[in-house]
Amino acid sequence: MKQRLLYLLRLYAAWLTPFVLMKPVFMLYNRSLGHFSMGDVASVVGHGFKQDLSTCGYLMALPLLLTICSVWTGWRKWMST
């Protein structure tokens, strides 16, 4: 059970990390459109964090259901250990 929870947490972090990191990269790429201060970047990341969390939650629906089914079927070969 511990392995399944760790798998889900690692997968959630794997989805969340690019979402959070791509906001400053996007702003840096589009810096010609305007001058962005570090406060602006922090504000964008902070305000988008809730949306990133909910999007990751939606993306985790299928892996969560498959992990729950693996409890009863014993099917774990698809999970990394």
Image (cartoon, rainbow, N blue to C red):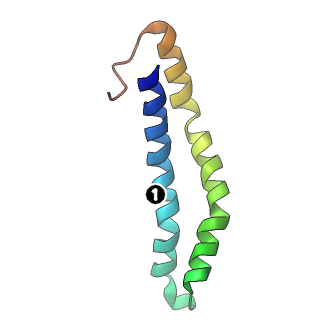
Percent across and percent down for residue 45 are 59, 67
Q: Residue at x 33, y 19 (%)?
A: 77
**Residue sitting nearer the eye, 72 or 38:** 38
Q: Secondary structure at mark 1?
A: helix
Q: Residue at x 47, y 15 (%)?
A: 70
Q: Residue at x 48, y 28 (%)?
A: 5
Classify 26 as above or below 81. below
Dot 1 crowding, Cα within 10 Å, few <14, some 14–19, many 20+: few
Classify 74 as above or below 42. above
Horizontal arrangement in the rendering, residue 37 relative to residue 73 (left or right): right
Percent across and percent down for residue 65 are 56, 24
Callout count? 1
Task: Give the image quarter of residue 80.
Answer: top left
Furthest-front residue in this view: 2
The amino acid type of the residue labelled 1 equals: Pro
Furthest-top residue in this view: 73
Classify 80 as above or below 15. above
Image quadrant in which the C terminus is located: top left
Q: Residue at x 40, y 13 (%)?
A: 75
Question: In this figure, which residue is indicated by the disc labeled 1?
Answer: 18
Task: Give the image quarter of residue 39.
Answer: bottom right
Classify 66 as above or below 28. above
